[in-house]
Amino acid sequence: MPFSYTIAFQQREVNGMPSYSGIIIHHSVCTAINGKGYDFLVTKNGDIIPSFTPTDPQFIHICLEGDFSHTEASELTPQVRHQLFVAQRLILHLYDDFEFSSKRLHEHHLYCPGIYFPWDSLVISHQDRYH
């Protein structure tokens, strides 16, 4: 799956590559998002939409379309499974490109990406590429 990094990442650089501390996950109903507070949006149908401007000099922000603050969000429909699969692939690709640990995946805050976000289904293993 090809990913485009034409985004103007103008963060700190190490050996010519931007240096990040990790990835922060959001859901699209987060009030801090407002349609522009992310570097990548993963839509419900699995499309990846990059932002044209960087969000944060320390973290890459990925927003998953949807509201994971309700119990219905904990139901892993085929659409949600596909969205998570695409997010996993994107995260692994970013880990490879920017060389940071898969343990550097964080929630935005207690209520974002929602208390019912399926973290157990977003399994990232940099070593064996398990997802």
Image: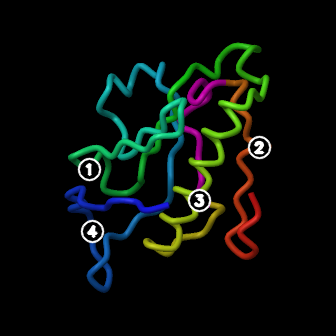
Task: Read off the residue under disc 4.
Answer: 12
- Please give the name of the residue rendered at 64% of the width and 42% of the height, measured from the top-left corner: 84
Q: Which mark is residue 104?
A: 3
The spot of residue 65 in percent (x, y) is 50, 28
Secondary structure beneath disc 4?
A: loop
The spot of residue 48 in percent (x, y) is 43, 44
Task: Read off the residue under disc 1.
Answer: 54
- CA gap, disc 3 to disc 2? 17 Å
Residue 3 included in the magenta stretch of the image? no
Compare marks 3 and 2 and give the one earlier in the sequence.
3
The three-letter code of the residue at mark 2 reads Ser
- Please give the name of the residue rendered at 27% of the width and 68% of the height, measured from the top-left corner: 12
Whether label 3 touches label 1, CB < 8 Å: no
Whether label 3 touches label 2, CB < 8 Å: no
- CA gap, disc 1 to disc 4? 12 Å
Horizontal arrangement in the rendering, residue 35 relative to residue 23 (left or right): left
Q: Nearer the viewer, residue 23 or 48?
A: 48
Bounds of the magenta segment: 104-114
The three-letter code of the residue at mark 1 reads Pro
Secondary structure beneath disc 2?
A: helix
Compare marks 3 and 1 and give the one earlier in the sequence.
1
Considering the whole magenta stretch, tell me its main secondary structure: loop
The spot of residue 33 in percent (x, y) is 37, 27
Sort mark 1 into few (<14), some (14-19) or many (20+) by Cα contacts within 10 Å.
Answer: many
- Please give the name of the residue rendered at 70% of the width and 24% of the height, measured from the top-left corner: 115
Secondary structure beneath disc 1?
A: loop
Task: Read off the residue under disc 2.
Answer: 121
- Please give the name of the residue rendered at 32% of the width and 49% of the height, measured from the top-left corner: 56
Q: Nearer the viewer, residue 45 or 60?
A: 45
Residue 40 appears in which quarter of the rendering? top left
